[in-house]
Amino acid sequence: MTDSLTARLRRTVKDGAGTSVAPTRGVNAGDPTHAATTSSGEVLLPRLADMGAMARGPAMRDAANNWNWQRQLRQNLGPYIEPLAKLAGVSGTVSIDLRFANVFELSLAGDTTLVLAGFPVPAGVDCSAGVTLIVNNPGGYVLSWPASVVPMDEVEDTVAAGKRAVFVLLTTDNGASWDLMSAGARDV
């Protein structure tokens, strides 16, 4: 009779440390030549690791032909959280160092020129990157973008007085050029 993996794991855990459990092949095949004993830890830990690897495969089915992507993402990523770099009272030339965060919040205190620096991927490695920039402009200051930042068609690249704007920058050439998109603005 064939034992299920779950039944074997339950027995292993129930028996406790220091007990012997026959290897899977010996249990399934009933083959006495594979009856060498091992401790429960030597059997249980690799099996649990295998179960975790199976659960995190490329995709999981929750029913025939129904892929449960939301569950899969939760297992692999958990809640999606990124570091936030807050820069208050900025004016003049401000360096946005991409090594420290992907989301930046700037509170302008004067006309500001941005510089994108510290792209974390070496040249010659193909990758894309996105940066979210939140700009609070209480006083109607001018925000200037680097020459490498190109606004997409009909994108507003300024922040009106008393507004908070969200911009998304995207590069596909390791930071040589950036596409600028506006996610909108609201009152500060």
Image: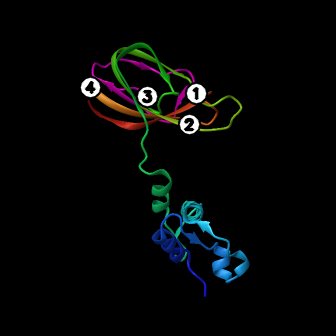
Say the numbered circle drawn on residue 119: 1
Tags 4 and 2 in contact by the CB under 8 Å rule?
Answer: no
Q: Is residue 143 magenta?
A: yes
Residue 157: image tag: 3
User: Which residue appears farthest toward the bottom when viewing the image?
Assistant: 1
Q: Secondary structure at mark 2?
A: strand
Front of the two marks 3 and 1: 1
- The kind of residue tagged 3 is Asp
Question: Which numbered dot is residue 129?
Answer: 2
Reading the chain from its start, which is encountered first: label 1 or label 4? 1
CB atoms at circles 1 and 2 under 8 Å apart? Answer: yes
Q: Please, what secondary structure does the residue beneath circle 1 have?
A: loop
Q: Position of residue 138 (x, y in %)?
A: 27, 22
Camera-side mark, 4 or 2:
2
**Residue 37 in view, yes or no:** yes
**Residue under pointer 4:** 162
Q: Quadrant of the N terminus?
A: bottom right
Q: Which amino acid, by three-letter code, is at mark 4?
A: Gly
| Prevailing secondary structure of the magenta residues | loop
Q: Measured along the vertical axis of the image, is residue 108 above or below residue 3?
A: above
Region rendered in magenta = 134-159
Verify whether residue 26 appears in magenta: no
Q: Who's the residue at 42% across and 42% down the image?
A: 81
Sequence-wise first label, 3 or 4: 3
Q: Amino acid at mark 2?
A: Ala
